[in-house]
Amino acid sequence: MSYCRFGGGSDVYMYPTGSFLGKPTIVCCMCRLLGGDSDTECLGPAEALFHLHQHLAVGDRVPQHAIDRLDREAAADGGREKKR
Ligand SMILES: [Zn+2]
């Protein structure tokens, strides 16, 4: 399920693509930060969250629910790492 998609107050389309080295990979499809014709691949929710903040910094619209979801996933990810 995508984190957010174009339209409805969103300038970003971000969705999970799988995993790499045990971390989920999340892609920002047709990323506006790259001019809108390339994808940005993020490794792990914390990196994806940072990427969304980069969009916010340039004035792109990012739905709050996408930020909240990545925030939760990043917190859960960090929690797991601390227990190891
Ligand atoms: Zn992007």
Image (spheres, helix red, strand yellow):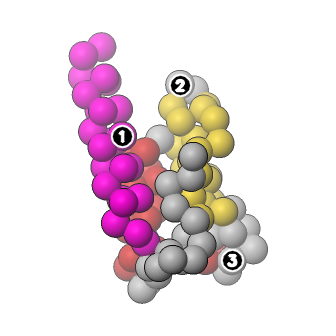
CA gap, disc 2 and disc 1: 14 Å
Residue at position x 57%, y 46% from top? Answer: 1
Is residue 80 found left or right of 17 in the rendered image? left
> Is the distance from the Cβ of mark 1 to the nearest ligand 1 atom less than 8 Å?
no
Could you tell which of marks 2 and 1 lies nearer the N-terminus? 2
Dot 3 falls on a residue whose secondary structure is loop
Secondary structure at badge 2 equals loop
Name the residue rendered at 47%, 41% in the picture: 44
Seen in the picture, residue 53 relative to 73 is either above or below; the reply is below
Which residue type carries mark 2? Gly
Residue on which the image places disc 1:
73
Q: Is residue 74 visible?
A: yes
Looking at numbered disc 3 in the image, what kind of residue is underneath it? Answer: Gly
Magenta-tinted stretch: 62-84
**Residue 3 part of the magenta segment:** no
Which residue, as the protein is rendered here, is positioned at the far top? 84
The mark closer to the camera, 2 or 1, is 1
Q: Residue at x 43, y 65 (%)?
A: 52
For label 3, the residue is 36
Residue 50 seen in the figure: no
Q: Is residue 39 above or below residue 57?
A: above
Q: Residues within 10 Å of mark 3 (few under 14, many from 20)?
A: few
Above-or-below relation of 50 to 10: above
Do tag 2 and tag 3 residues touch (Cβ < 8 Å)?
no
